[in-house]
Amino acid sequence: NAGVTQTPKFRVLKTGQSMTLLCAQDMNHEYMYWYRQDPGMGLRLIHYSVGEGTTAKGEVPDGYNVSRLKKQNFLLGLESAAPSQTSVYFCASSFGTSGYEQYFGPGTRLTVT
Amino acid sequence: AQKITQTQPGMFVQEKEAVTLDCTYDTSDQSYGLFWYKQPSSGEMIFLIYQGSYDEQNATEGRYSLNFQKARKSANLVISASQLGDSAMYFCAPPCSGNTPLVFGKGTRLSVIA
């Protein structure tokens, strides 16, 4: 059982470049999330989705866009990367919110130079 | 928004000893859940334990248990018989209800000393 997978695992971008991070889950979860984790910090929620076709802003949404066209996939886009977006990005999914644990992907390490 | 506070940036514990990691939260909800996650140096996030606000007993999961004090709005994680493999970051995730997603605390780095 694959659980939550993220593509790619590592990426280096130059300032101004764009990229898309892909998150896929095979657990039929309704809820999906994108977090960023900076060195020595906790996780901060970027965007989340409560179901196919829906997205919502989290704590730090600026500079990112997301789409949930299919229930199993949640895409995170950076249209014009900035050095401040250098971070480790985690995707997670859950069956619900209250009382349901989140299952995390392995993370994507992004460096913007 | 829900608020979570983990006041201990770093903790040390001797192997085989017990350790308590603090977590306090702020919520006006009557029904909610609390989560603890572990993040080892390899980076993955691992679910440890969950406490529901209406659970009559403190949650336990192997060597992990929660000291849940609802009136004080605290849910401290107790790790008994610490092992070297327990060295990691530990995150408390605050009460969530309805469609409110988890917002994690800043974490506590636990180091287990042989």
Image (tube, grey):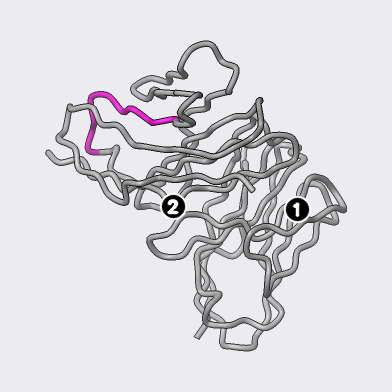
Disc 2 from disc 1: Cα separation: 28 Å
Q: Position of residue B80 (x, y in %)?
A: 27, 24
Asked if residue A13 is positioned above or below residue A94 in the image, the reply reads: below
Kind of element beneath mark 1 = strand
The three-letter amino acid code for the residue at tag 2 is: Lys
Kind of element beneath mark 2 = loop
Horizontal relation, residue B87 to residue A27: left or right: left
Tag 2 residue: B106
Which residue is pictured at 68% across the width and 61% down the height?
Answer: A22
Tag 1 residue: A73
The crowd level at tag 2 (other Cα within 10 Å; few <14, some 14-19, many 20+) is many
Q: Which residues are magenta?
A: B75-84
Q: Is residue B112 magenta?
A: no
Name which quarter of the figure residue B111 lies in: top left
Name which quarter of the figure residue A14 lies in: bottom right
Q: Are marks 2 and 1 on the same chain?
A: no
Which residue is pictured at 77% across the width and 47% down the height?
Answer: A72
The three-letter amino acid code for the residue at tag 1 is: Asn
Asked if residue B19 is positioned above or below residue B57 in the image, the reply reads: below
Q: Position of residue A44 (x, y in %)?
A: 56, 57
Q: Position of residue B83 (x, y in %)?
A: 23, 32
Horizontal relation, residue B7 to residue A46: left or right: left
Asked if residue B73 is positioned above or below residue A104 in the image, the reply reads: above
Q: Position of residue A27 (x, y in %)?
A: 70, 37
Which residue is pictured at 69% across the width and 45% down the height?
Answer: A25
Quadrant position of the N terminus of chain A in the picture: top right
Which of discs 2 and 1 lies nearer the camera? The answer is 2
The reply to whether callout 2 and callout 1 are in contact (CB within 8 Å) is: no
